[in-house]
């Protein structure tokens, strides 16, 4: 028995050494991303699959910074590296919500932080059906994601379901404590909800793609609406609570403490798939303005050390094989036609393409969120 | 001459032993503190000297709420922790029952449970859909306690509860050490001449242990005024403990304001440090007499 064990250990050791030896032959391409654990899991799976492919010419390595653990510093770090003229860094590929790329460019002070990709080096690019709203020559979308309203159809009958934002406010007031959105600084579901609520009441739709501070003057009606629903939101121990992180509201829905929340579609689907949310959970959007969503893109920096590796990795992610991983691993909305993907799960996400796109750079973090804090929290 | 040389040698030896610690302290403690103090007086955009960061902290409605909340939670934690610890320590010192000996060997246990684990355990039990709530669901629906929601988390109650969990064992340890220094013979002799229990406590035990109680109180104060993990995990969005507020400012890139918050926390801690040093000095003076 002991002998067998040592034999197994020896083989494992050899295999590891061999693994290292093989890895060393190929140059590394480093992928940087931020987000929740599901994004980390997705990229771990994508990197593993890419590295396992025999015809890969590079080794993909993941550097992941989880939300709320210093992710806000990543764009500062990369911006600083760019401004100090560093080259050959390991910032090869950045994977972020398309809207977030604006804050990278803001930090760097120049669009040249990202290179124009070379379409010839990304076979399969013609299959990608999405064009990013910003930096279309620099960013390649690899999945889409959206915030939706999620509810349990067992608990909210079809005829009670609100279909406009005004009806939603009425529903919330009629069902005190049964709706919650998370502190918008701690997760995209909450900030998607707050931003949709604010921007839907700004008539000029160009505000949604602007980093101009003048739009702050137009946000009062949105804040008024948020103030109006505040007393009827989920509360505990006698005061209203904005739970921390997307998971916070998700837990409330799972534990049946609330009936409806804004949540990321992929997180809802994942929780239905592993049984923590009931099969009767439904997702939908309001008719007068859908919650925010985003295509999530890959961008190649001009300060990285391996642009060729970056192109090859991107080509893999948008290939049917890579898209299948995105769909099955995180229930993401694929960017290529579902017909190209060989997966039983593609119907799940078929109806989720409808979302609003807001890209306001650092305006959110530096102005709108602090305003939310000062307006809503002391209530 | 020889004597002088060896004196010089031993002095060098002491410097040599102290140098690594001193250099490390300079680099990772003293320098950042000085840096933070300077930063707290700087204007975010120009870097010029300003009192703006501090005046914001003391005039902004939100920031002031956070400061009062922090003081309130910390003081309440100290008072409650010392009260329970003193009772527990007295019981452990003067009781010979089996229960006392069991508690004596168990009471430090919470100190050995990592903060994160303990806080998550509290959450599992106390949250509005936690263990207590699930158990109450088993009661008949007509009962008032059916679907009982403790409502203890995400407000000051939960933070104080968790603080007590961590600090009662610690304070009990310090106070127990002080009480064990009071010999049974003097208590017994006081009893022999007819002193009642209450009289013995106020005339002998309290004066003999008060300085250690103060020391325990300062330590509890210091570790809680700057606490982060507990209020971050089970505190409310508003008001926040200063540690959480500091982190929020940091993540909104208001580094100068964050520096001012750190200085404020530092100030609060140093007040309790002064109490600690003063208590120690007084004790020394007493020993001299």
Image: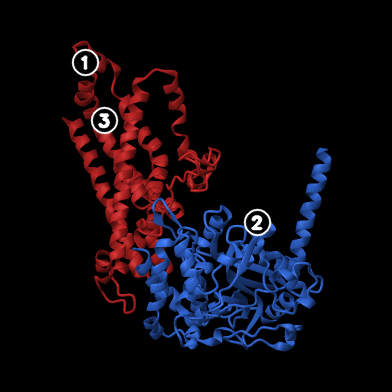
Q: How many marks?
A: 3
Say which mark, if any, is on residue A102: none
As drawn, is B117 to the left or to the right of B199?
A: right
Circle 2 sits on which residue? A278
Q: Colour of chain B?
A: red
* Towards the viewer: B146 or A214: B146
**Residues at marks 2 and 1, CA–CA distance in whole angstroms:** 70 Å
Q: Is residue B279 left or right of residue B250?
A: left
The residue to which callout 3 is attached is B209
Name the spot of residue B191 as percent of width and height, x first: 23, 14
Do residues under tags 2 and 1 come within 8 Å of each other at their CB atoms?
A: no
Chain in blue colour: A
Q: Nearer the viewer, mark 2 or mark 1?
A: 2
Using the image as rendered, state which of residue B69 and residue A290 is in the foreground. A290
* Residue nearer the viewer, B278 or A93: A93
Work out whether mark 3 precedes mark 1 in sequence or the reverse, and give the earlier one: 1
Assign a secondary structure to mark 3: helix
């Amino acid at each position: 028995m002991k002998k067998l064990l040592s034999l197994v250990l020896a083989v494992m050791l050899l295999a590891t050494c061999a693994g290292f030896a093989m890895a060393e032959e190929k140059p590394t391409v480093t992928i940087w991303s931020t987000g929740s654990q599901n994004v980390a899991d997705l990229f771990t799976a994508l990197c593993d699959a890419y590295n396992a492919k025999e015809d890969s010419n590079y080794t993909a390595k993941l550097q992941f910074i989880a939300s709320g653990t210093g992710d806000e510093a990543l764009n500062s770090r990369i911006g600083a590296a760019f401004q100090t003229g560093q080259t050959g860094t390991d910032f090869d590929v950045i994977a972020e919500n398309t809207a977030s790329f604006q804050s990278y460019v803001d930090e760097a002070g120049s669009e040249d932080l990202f290179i124009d990709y070379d379409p010839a080096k990304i076979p399969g690019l013609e299959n990608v059906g999405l064009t990013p709203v910003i930096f279309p020559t620099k960013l390649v979308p690899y999945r889409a994601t959206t915030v939706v309203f999620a509810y349990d159809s067992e608990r909210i009958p079809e005829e009670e379901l609100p279909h406009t934002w005004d009806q939603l406010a009425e529903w919330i007031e009629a069902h005190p404590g049964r709706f919650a959105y998370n502190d918008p600084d701690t997760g995209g579901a909450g900030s998607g909800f707050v931003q949709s609520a604010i921007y839907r009441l700004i008539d000029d739709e160009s505000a949604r793609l602007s980093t101009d501070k003048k739009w702050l003057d137009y946000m009062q009606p949105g804040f008024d609406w948020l103030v109006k629903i505040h007393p009827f939101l989920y509360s505990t121990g006698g005061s209203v609570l904005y739970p921390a992180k997307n998971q916070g509201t998700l837990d409330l829905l799972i534990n049946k403490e609330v009936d409806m929340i804004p949540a990321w579609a992929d997180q809802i689907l994942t929780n239905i798939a592993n049984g923590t949310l009931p099969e009767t959970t439904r997702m939908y959007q309001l008719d007068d303005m859908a919650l925010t969503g985003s295509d999530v893109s890959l961008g190649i920096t001009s300060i990285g050390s391996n642009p060729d590796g970056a192109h090859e990795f991107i080509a893999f992610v948008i290939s049917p094989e890579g898209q299948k991983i995105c769909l099955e691993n995180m229930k993401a909305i694929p960017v290529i036609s579902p017909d190209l993907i060989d997966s039983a799960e593609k119907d799940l996400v078929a109806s989720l393409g409808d979302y609003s796109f807001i890209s306001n750079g650092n305006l959110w973090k530096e102005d709108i969120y602090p305003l939310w804090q000062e307006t809503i929290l002391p209530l | 001459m020889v004597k002088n040389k060896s004196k010089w040698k031993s002095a060098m030896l002491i410097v040599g032993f102290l140098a690594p610690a001193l250099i490390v302290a300079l680099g990772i403690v003293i320098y950042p503190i000085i840096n933070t103090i300077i930063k707290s007086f700087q204007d975010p955009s120009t870097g010029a000297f300003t009192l703006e960061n501090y005046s914001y902290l003391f005039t902004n409605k939100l920031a002031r709420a956070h400061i009062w909340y922090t003081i309130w939670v910390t003081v309440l934690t100290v008072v409650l922790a010392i009260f329970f610890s003193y009772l527990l320590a007295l019981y452990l010192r003067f009781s010979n029952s089996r229960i006392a000996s069991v508690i004596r060997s168990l009471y430090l246990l919470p100190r050995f449970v990592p903060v994160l684990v303990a806080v998550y355990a509290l959450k599992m039990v106390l949250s509005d859909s936690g263990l207590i709530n699930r158990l109450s669901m088993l009661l008949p629906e007509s009962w008032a306690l059916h679907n009982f929601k403790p409502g203890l988390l995400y407000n000051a109650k939960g933070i104080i509860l968790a603080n007590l969990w961590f600090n009662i064992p610690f304070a009990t340890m310090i106070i127990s050490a002080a009480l064990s220094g009071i010999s049974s013979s003097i208590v017994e002799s006081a009893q022999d001449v007819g002193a009642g229990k209450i009289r013995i406590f106020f005339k002998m035990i309290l004066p003999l242990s008060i300085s250690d109680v103060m020391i325990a109180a300062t330590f509890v104060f210091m570790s809680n005024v700057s606490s982060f993990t507990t209020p971050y995990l089970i505190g409310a969005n508003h008001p926040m403990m200063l540690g959480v507020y500091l982190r929020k400012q940091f993540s909104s890139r208001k580094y100068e304001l964050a520096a001012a918050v750190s200085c404020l926390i530092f100030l609060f801690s140093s007040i309790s440090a002064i109490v600690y040093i003063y208590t120690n000095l007084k004790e020394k003076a007493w020993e001299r007499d």
